[in-house]
Image: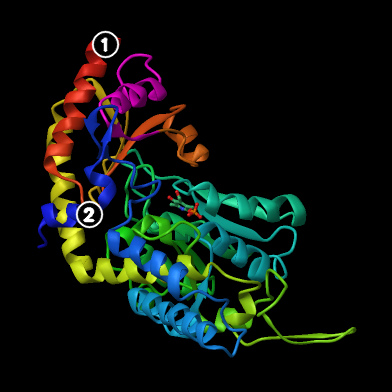
Amino acid sequence: MYDVASVRADFPILSRQVNGKPLVYLDNGASAQKPQVVIDAMTRAYSYEYANVHRGLHYLSNLATEQYEAVRGKIARFLNADEREIIFTSGTTEGINLVSYGWAAPRLQAGDEIVLSILEHHANIVPWHFLRERQGVVLKWVDCDANGDLDPQAVLDAIGPRTKLVAVTHMSNVLGTVVDVTAICKGARDKGVPVMVDGSQAAVHIAVDVKTIGCDFYAITGHKLYGPSGSGAIFIRADRQAEMRPFMGGGDMIREVSRETITWNDPPMKFEAGTPGIVQQIGLGVALDYMTGLGMANIAARERSLRDYAQAKINGLNWLNVQGNSSTKGAIFSFTLEGAVHAHDISTVLDKRGIAVRAGTHCAMPLMEHMGVSATCRASFGLYNTEAEVDALISALELCRDLFS
Ligand SMILES: Cc1ncc(COP(=O)(O)O)c(C=O)c1O
């Protein structure tokens, strides 16, 4: 186990005050804070080591290319993938759109189906809706139960003869439920159906092994992994890459261009058009080093104990309605207050106490509708949060209850 106090000292923002109070940052599900090593690496890259990648033969271009390409290897090791199966993206949204435009759009016909879970973030919904709108693809939804659990068998039962893809999250950004994607992938593979897994939340909190999971596509986003915004990647298994057209066209993704013809570069470059987020990806590499330095098993254990601590406190509050109670749940709590207080009012009161949570629909409107709520407040914990911060949240919520009752 790592020392939380010294980890906190690695994140400069955690020492600041907000509204005259020490910052309690519980909005990690939206985006995580950055350790100084990431900030320093990006400053160094821009200050002394910057040039475009893959293009120049000069010293700085080679240096930047080396550093940038080394991150592909780090991501591959982080996910237990092969390097050539890692495609750099600006985040999960781009990754899923790549699969939608590059793999699904050329293959799916009107009446073909995509199976989705109700737990999905809009990033794993809207690209499939595009296919519904443009190509007549049918979206088949699988609900979670009252605890927020998604039964893998229900997902597999939804697969019919016209199902061409299952798109499912590994961890709900609203309820914290960790989905048994390994069971889903195994069953789907037996039926010959590929699976797109949205790993945006899960990869932050638990060790991910795409080979064990057996997925075809697995998307991650750097800014939740304590790295920069605009960084990320998607794992696409080599056989699926071979079935794909490029999504965006431009420099780097081609081998030759003439007036009449183009030929594509080999994967993964085939899927990476234009100047990428060079320094962002370098920053992500350092963030992954930071996480693996602490140890993913240690991070998971630490966050489990924080979740249990928070859960025990929250269990005693009968005026707080917490959504989802899965036994697999990570340290994410979505809640509303008894009565008609809007989630935005709660988050405003918390903000006055220096506590940052997210309020709204969390880019998961179908899930909100399924749960019968218009909005929730969400406290989402990260590797640097503490029991004292849970206590601060609880006492601020007690204040809300007194104010609004
Ligand atoms: C589960 C899930 N999927 C996808 C995304 C989208 O990630 P990004 O906006 O970084 O592309 C998020 C971000 O909130 C998320 O929580």
Residue at 41% x, 65% y: name it.
42
Q: Mark 1: which amino acid? A: Leu
- Name the foreground residue: 293 vs 119: 293
Q: Which label sits on residue 403? A: 1
Looking at the picture, tell me which residue is in the foreground, 226 or 92. Answer: 226
Q: Mark 2 or mark 1: which comes first in sequence?
A: 2
Q: Quadrant of the C terminus?
A: top left
Observer able to see residue 65:
yes
Instruction: Judge left or right: residue 131 versus residue 153.
Output: right
For mark 1, give the secondary structure. Answer: helix
State which quarter of the image contains the N terminus.
bottom left
Residues in magenta?
336-358
Q: In this rendering, is residue 178 above or below 369? A: below
Dot 1: within a 10 Å radius of its alpha carbon, few (fewer than 14), some, or many (20 or more) residues?
few
Residue at x-position 53% and y-position 67%: 277
Tell me if residue 339 is in the magenta stretch. Answer: yes
Query: Does residue 329 show up?
Result: no
Question: Camera-side residue: 326 or 394?
Answer: 394
